[in-house]
Image: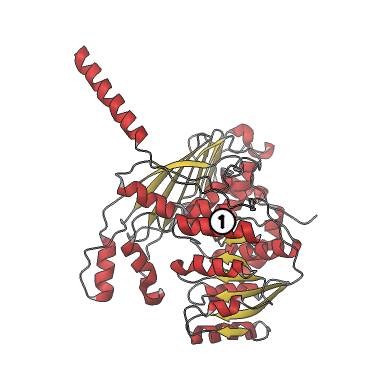
Amino acid sequence: MKNKILLYLAVMLAWGNLNAQQMLTTVVPDRPAGQQDALCMTAPPLEVVRVGFVGLGMRGPGAVERWCQIPGTKVVALCDVEPDRVEACQQLLAKHGRGRAAGYSGLTEVYKQMCDRDDIDIIYICTDWVHHAPIALYAMEHGKHVAIEVPAAMNLDEIWQLINTSERTRKHCMMLENCVYDFFEMACLNMAQQGLFGEVLHVEGAYLHNLDDFWEEYWQNWRLDYNRQYRGDVYPTHGIGPDCQVLNIHRGDRMDYLVAMDTKPVNGAKVVQKMTGQPCDDFQNGDQTSTMIHTVNGKTLLIQHDVLTPRPYSRMYQIVGTDGYASKYPVGQLLFRQDKLPAEAKNHENLNAHRALPNDLRDQMLDRYTPAWVKELQETARQVGGHGGMDYIMDYRLVYCLRNGLPLDMDVYDMAEWCCLGELTRLSLEHNSAPVQIPDFTRGAWNRINGFKYEFAK
């Protein structure tokens, strides 16, 4: 028996050493000579933010309409390959009393003509995924800040190009991750920053959204085609963005490595056959992909992706701390050690260490910790709309920071960290769920800033 135990231990130690050697490493290229990082980067303040929109299909028109209702903006140009989409957005401008914008349409690269103008400050990109990075790179090279719909980059090569170009040109490169501006997430972020959760140890996030009702709305099936061709978490940013802000990623901690697992692909092939009438035997993306991430400071993240199975919409959003807990789905829940609660709440008759706070006390806590600047905007945000108002707050904050010459809420390194799962999860999956090293996109500056914060004009 003793010999069997020793043999078992020897096998396990050998297996552990083998796996340690199988960590898939990634290359961090040297920063080009003469460049510096873009942490807390600012640009000269703009009295009026002049914007050009490219991509006016599903998300673009909503963005145009929101910007029409944000003070200090001017819509200079509209661009899409389809002329009727440009004209439809011209009508949105008229609806809000704005003058017609310059229109560009017809060719895939007609956006270059828009970027060549000298009366635009920022290009707002809402195209299909594969055109995000090329348009952003061209725009920054031609003196424009860029705001890019999610995901902003589809692989590490695009990510490093965007980082290097932003650093060199000193132009902002922000990914339009709206979910960090959801009211529940912003209140919980403030709670975390005020210490209510104690030390945050684990977070969860996801994009669980059955797209059966939407596949046909994507121009030329681009989204379904991408899932057919690529394996991995191809759409991670809605889940990981709020988590990274809570964990202060590249503001005192950084993601170190990940491990991914997926199910076999089943429903994707059925969707292709339903839409095309042809059998599909080459669908790559599993119906569900799960990714575990470990940080340098010993925290963990669980990120999931599933757009193919019938389940209720969820971004999972969970915070697990030494002194408290939060989750948003299927219903908002909070739980804290009683010494973390305000004095008037500690005698609540239904407090219990084994279940979430009663709804009335939960709502009181959410209201108490909703930042004052959010409360000032939330009524307007809900009226203007955009996923319940978070899109409006996202665009408002972008304009506010540009007008005041402040660092943006999300920088190019946030973009890189939240998008890198696309390629890194594929690498892990293709190597039997091997751990994959996550690059330090700041190239050594990840702990120079102490904590995430919103910037405001003095």
Closest to the observer, 191 or 16 = 16
View extreme (right): residue:
458
View extreme (top): residue:
2
User: Which residue is pictured at 65% across the width and 53% down the height?
Assistant: 34
Across and down, in percent, residue 429 comes to 32, 48
Point out the image quarter for the C terminus.
bottom right
* Quarter occupied by residue 383: bottom right
Across and down, in percent, residue 158 comes to 48, 59
Closest to the observer, 328 or 20 = 20
User: Which residue is pictured at 38% across the width and 71% down the height?
Assistant: 222
Point out the image quarter for the N terminus.
top left
Residue 190 in view in this figure: yes
Q: Is residue 204 left or right of residue 79?
A: left
Q: Amino acid at mark 1?
A: Ile
Q: Is residue 166 left or right of residue 156?
A: right
- 143 over 98 or under it: above or below: above
Residue named by callout 1: 163
Residue 214 in view in this figure: no
User: Which residue is pictured at 61% across the width and 80% down the height?
Assistant: 77
Closest to the observer, 18 or 211 = 18
Across and down, in percent, residue 107 comes to 47, 82
Across and down, in percent, residue 258 comes to 42, 43
Report helix, strand or loop for mark 1: helix
Mark 1 packing: few (<14 Cα in 10 Å), some, or many (20+)? many
Q: Is residue 137 left or right of residue 364?
A: left
View extreme (front): residue:
33
